Image: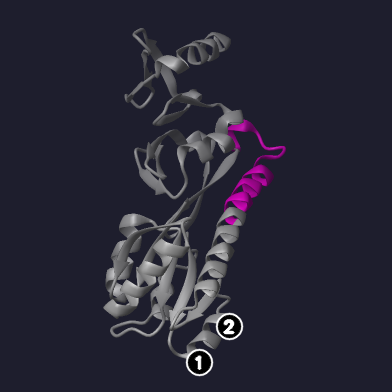
Amino acid sequence: MIEAVIIDDEKNARDTLRGLVRQFCPEVQLIGEAASANQAHQLIEARKPALLFLDIRMPFGNGLELLKAYEYPGFEVIFTTAYSEYALHALRLSALDYLLKPIDIGELQEAVRKAAKALALRQRNERYITLLNNLDTPAQQQRVVLPFSGGYQVSSFSEIVRLEASKNYSWVIFANAKRLLCSRTLKDFEGVLGEYGFLRVHQSHLINARFIRTYHKGRGGTLTLTNGEEVEVARSRKQEVLQYIDQLE
């Protein structure tokens, strides 16, 4: 599912596009709308969408100016405009796609297909960058690419204590107590980090085993980490966690 927002100053235009997306693009989930560049910036920061349907010509800061605030955006953009000269400008900016109003259903569906492919490629590239960074690199220096709304952060494994699920996002908690909300699911991170000493101990928790201090018995049990945090272990994950701890002894 592609989480998307509509940014357009005209209510009729937003209503029309919303209806078309809901009827003809089932792979898209609309999670918000904005009527200005300022509202759009707040919406992007709050909801971390994967895709923007962005009107180019708006008062008080147009869509092109909005994008200047994101040097390495964590989203793809489909421009929408009623003016063909802006469409040419969008192409020069290497836009994913643009839609001329009134929006054609077939062109909308094709633009969404392009977005799905681009987002999948973006995720594969992040995994590839991680792999290249870690080849022939000592474990304590290996790194992972963390995508967020403003771009990407490259962090070493030794800096990350744990990751916590937040719907379609993940909180990354660092040893220095800082937190970063990343636009990837915990399952995505498990696929990247699982072979590097990160354990999925719960539906909501992926931990760096280097930071385990103690295990406390219980139905599933709990882990106390070196930063003092306690993380619940799911009953279904208990044996896997205990086996891993036994290997460390």
Q: CA distance from mark 2 to mark 1?
A: 11 Å
Q: Is residue 182 above or below residue 56?
A: above
Q: Amino acid at mark 2?
A: Arg
Placement of the C terminus among the 4 image quadrants: top right
Please name whichever residue, 233 or 104, is drawn nearer the observer in this view of the structure: 104
Q: Nearer the viewer, mark 2 or mark 1?
A: 1
Q: Is residue 55 above or below residue 196?
A: below
Looking at the magenta stretch, what is its main secondary structure?
A: helix
* Extent of the magenta region: 122-141
Q: Is residue 14 above or below residue 88?
A: above
Q: Residue at x 48, y 55 (%)?
A: 27
Residue 136 covered by magenta stretch: yes
- Measured as percent of width and height from the top left, residue 212 is found at 44, 20
User: Is residue 244 visible to us here?
Assistant: yes
- Which mark is drawn over residue 85? 1
- Measured as percent of width and height from the top left, residue 189 is found at 52, 39
Disc 2 secondary structure class: helix
Q: Residue at x 61, y 29 (%)?
A: 195
Query: Left or right: 98 with respect to 14?
Result: right
Q: Residue at x 58, y 83 (%)?
A: 92
Please name whichever residue, 89 or 180, is drawn nearer the observer in this view of the structure: 89
Q: Amino acid at mark 1?
A: Glu
User: Is residue 9 visible to us here?
Assistant: no
- Measured as percent of width and height from the top left, residue 191 is found at 57, 36
Query: Left or right: 168 with respect to 114?
Result: left
- Measured as percent of width and height from the top left, residue 91 is found at 57, 81
Judging by the rendered image, the residue that carries numbered circle 2 is 92
Residue 9 covered by magenta stretch: no
Please name whichever residue, 121 or 61, is drawn nearer the observer in this view of the structure: 121
